[in-house]
């Protein structure tokens, strides 16, 4: 059994979606966090045993604990290969899959955050430039047909679609048709709709 | 194109000759992947890129950075350090430095690899550029909180996954060794000992001999 430590309408919402796509039994453990707008409450100190910084998401799968969205996605997709949510290890798409997962957690996470904070206005941040990241993202999403690795939807699609939804909502990415179309396609999936219903727990 | 075939390998162990090309520039983030390839005993060649930082037309990295690898079996390109580490340990499991799918430490291994790229590097970069971390909004935390987590794990140690050295230690150990006594790094005997364990490994000495000059 998978337990998801989750706070409604937070980064862990995309893991509800991922678990709906996975099709394995799971339960949600509602976990308090402090939200970006300052509302909410901190999790109890005991929660640090699950997540070192008392954030969400984290999962516990029969005693195996995983945190970080991309870590969780990589873990469950490989652990349950019947879900067909990741190219198999001997699939030539595996290299791009691994790269896009790490890129999501690295530059695609840090660069828009830097922009949100206005840090890249006057000097380079060291994360890479926004324009270069955005050009890469446009090319990557533009190549999705219909998904990042072709006809099979993957765990990486959950992460990228969730990021596009979030960044476009906060105007951290331009609403280019290529992003809007891909995100809309992903949001139409039955698992995405079930996840929205389960988001509040 | 400057290709230097580097490493002999035991073909009987690996079956078909598999070749990894590492796109590399000396004394950068790609140096530790020579270390990892040495640990894995993987057959590899180094392509030292020209015009760094800039665009070498032969470098497949989307932003012209290093490291990147190309698996010459399939032509697949992999970039981003945590992805390269995961890809290589999954491809060369016999070295035993990356828990495989189904092993109990796989979850911790993936968490540490992703944490490196999404928390530790941005935390150091925020400190380096003097930007406070907006804690609820950002996906990362400040250096002090991140290092408290790392030090907590290493106090049980000696490695991030406990008794067994893994590719995650290649990323973390070389990072801490590079920062050395920098004021960016919290002072810690635990980290000093960890750096000693990682940097004493014979594979690192072999890698340093192959790092090259700029």
Image (tube, rainbow, N blue to C red):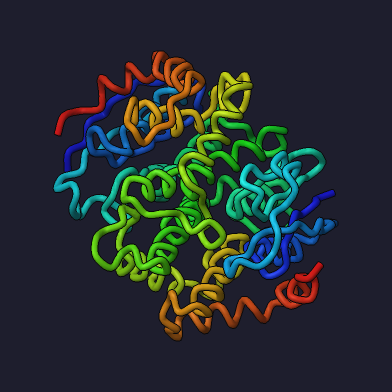
Question: Residue B81: x percent and y percent?
Answer: 42, 43
Q: Nearer the viewer, residue A66 or A30?
A: A30
**Horizontal side, residue B45 vs residue B164: left or right:** left
Where's residue B61, x and y in %?
32, 53
Q: Residue at x 71, y 46 (%)?
A: A79
Taking B50 as reference, is A178 left or right?
right
| Residue found at x 23% / y 38% | B25
Q: Nearer the viewer, residue B200 or B177?
A: B177
Q: Is residue B138 above or below residue B28?
A: below
Q: Residue at x 53, y 46 (%)?
A: B114
Q: Nearer the viewer, residue B207 or A114?
A: A114
Name the quarter where the C terminus of chain B is drawn. Answer: top left
Position of the N terminus of chain B, as image quadrant, is: top left
Q: Position of residue B26 (x, y in %)?
A: 22, 34
- Residue A110 visible in the displayed image: yes
Q: Nearer the viewer, residue A171 or A155?
A: A171
| Residue that appears at 14% across and 48% down | B51
Indicate left or right for B72 with B16 as reference: left
């Amino acid at each position: 059994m998978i337990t998801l430590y989750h706070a409604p309408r937070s980064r862990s919402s995309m893991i509800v979606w991922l678990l709906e796509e996975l099709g394995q039994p799971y339960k949600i453990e509602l976990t308090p966090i402090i939200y970006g707008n300052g509302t909410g409450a901190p999790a109890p100190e005991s929660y640090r045993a699950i997540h070192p910084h008392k954030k969400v998401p984290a999962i516990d799968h029969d005693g195996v604990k995983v945190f970080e969205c991309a870590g969780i996605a990589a873990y469950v997709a490989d652990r349950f290969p019947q879900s067909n949510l990741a190219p198999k290890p001997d699939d030539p798409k595996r290299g791009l899959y691994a790269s896009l997962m790490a890129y999501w957690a690295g530059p695609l996470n840090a660069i828009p955050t830097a922009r949100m904070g206005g840090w890249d206005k006057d000097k380079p941040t060291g994360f890479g430039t926004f324009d270069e990241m955005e050009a890469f993202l446009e090319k990557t999403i533009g190549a999705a047909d219909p998904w990042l690795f072709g006809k099979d939807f993957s765990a990486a699609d959950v992460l990228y679609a969730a990021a596009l939804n979030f960044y476009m909502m906060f105007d951290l990415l331009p609403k280019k048709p290529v992003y809007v179309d891909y995100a809309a396609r992903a949001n139409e999936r039955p698992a995405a709709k079930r996840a929205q219903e389960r988001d509040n727990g | 194109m400057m290709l230097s075939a580097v490493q002999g390998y035991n073909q009987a162990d690996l079956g078909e000759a598999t070749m990894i090309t590492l796109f590399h520039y000396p004394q950068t983030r790609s140096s530790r992947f020579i270390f990892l390839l040495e640990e894995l005993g993987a057959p590899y060649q180094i392509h030292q890129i020209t015009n760094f930082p800039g665009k070498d037309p032969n470098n497949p990295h989307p932003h012209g950075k290093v490291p990147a690898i190309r698996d010459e079996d399939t032509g697949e390109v992999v970039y981003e350090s945590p992805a390269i580490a995961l890809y290589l340990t999954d491809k060369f499991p016999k070295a035993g430095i990356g828990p495989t799918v189904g092993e109990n430490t796989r979850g911790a291994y993936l968490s540490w690899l992703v944490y490196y790229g999404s928390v530790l590097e941005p935390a150091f970069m925020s400190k380096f550029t003097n930007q406070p971390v907006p804690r609820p909004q950002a996906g990362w935390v400040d250096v002090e909180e991140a290092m408290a987590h790392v030090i907590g794990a290493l106090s049980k140690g000696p490695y991030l996954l406990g008794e067994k050295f893994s590719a995650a230690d290649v990323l973390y150990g070389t990072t801490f060794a590079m920062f050395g006594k920098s004021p960016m790094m919290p002072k810690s005997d635990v980290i000093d000992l960890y750096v000693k364990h990682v940097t004493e490994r014979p594979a690192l000495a072999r890698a340093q001999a192959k790092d090259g000059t700029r």
